[in-house]
Amino acid sequence: MTIDIIDLTDPEYRDLSSLQLAMVRAAQVKKNELVAAAEEEKRSLMYLMLSHNTARSMSRAYEEEQIDARMNEKIAAVREDLLYQLSYEALGSEGNEYGPYRYPQNPDLSLAPAQRFLVVRNYYMENVSDPKARLDAYAMDTLARSYLGEYYQTLYELLASYI
């Protein structure tokens, strides 16, 4: 797969974690799907205009430009989302004098509450596969109560919904 959703050098690609690489690949697949859908839409437009003997009209060129513009907007949104996800994931690679930020060993207290929610949710979703055991482990996590504050109950209800 050729990755052209973002421009990174080979050393920059090597520095990406496996999660970040998965994000890049998923965004590239989405971009490829958008390009294929736009090409199919242009092909359908061409057949429609051929059937009406208007394939050489300026309206076809205009419609194709509109299709390309919509596709480029959607691709830009996918790219921006990917860059946001990569920058957010990079937050976990930073650290302090106690080492890299990782929940629960060294939680990052500088994160906004919504970001803390995501960190704790990802921790439990990645580390405990059984939904019941996940909820039980979360219920016994006293650090999560103070770390999440008002978001503790929200995450509890979310994890309970998987049972």
Image (spheres, grey):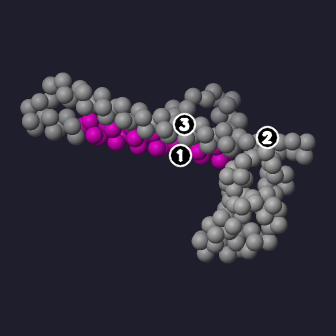
Label 3 to label 2: alpha-carbon separation: 22 Å
Q: Is residue 153 above or below residue 70?
A: below
Where is residue 41 shown, x and y percent of the image?
28, 40
Label 2 to label 1: alpha-carbon separation: 24 Å
What amino acid type is highlighted by mark number 3? Glu
Q: Tell me the crowding category of disc 3: few under 14, some 14 to 19, or many 20 or more residues within 10 angstroms, Cα based.
A: some
Reading the image, the residue beneath label 1 is 26
Which type of secondary structure does the marked residue at label 3 adopt? Answer: helix
Q: Quick check: is 137 in the magenta stretch? A: no
Reading the image, the residue beneath label 3 is 80
Q: Is residue 129 left or right of residue 139?
A: left
Q: Quadrant of the C terminus?
A: bottom right
Reading the image, the residue beneath label 2 is 94
Q: Tell me the crowding category of disc 1: few under 14, some 14 to 19, or many 20 or more residues within 10 angstroms, Cα based.
A: some
Q: Which residues are magenta?
A: 18-43
User: Which mark is nearer the camera, 2 or 1?
Assistant: 2
Comes first in the chain, label 3 or label 2: 3
Q: Is residue 93 left or right of residue 82?
A: right
Residue beneath the point at 52% across and 36% down: 79
Residue beneath the point at 29% across and 40% down: 40
Which residue is farthest front? 150
Using the image, tell me which numbered label, if any, was put on residue 147: none
User: Which quadrant of the structure image shows residue 162?
Assistant: bottom right
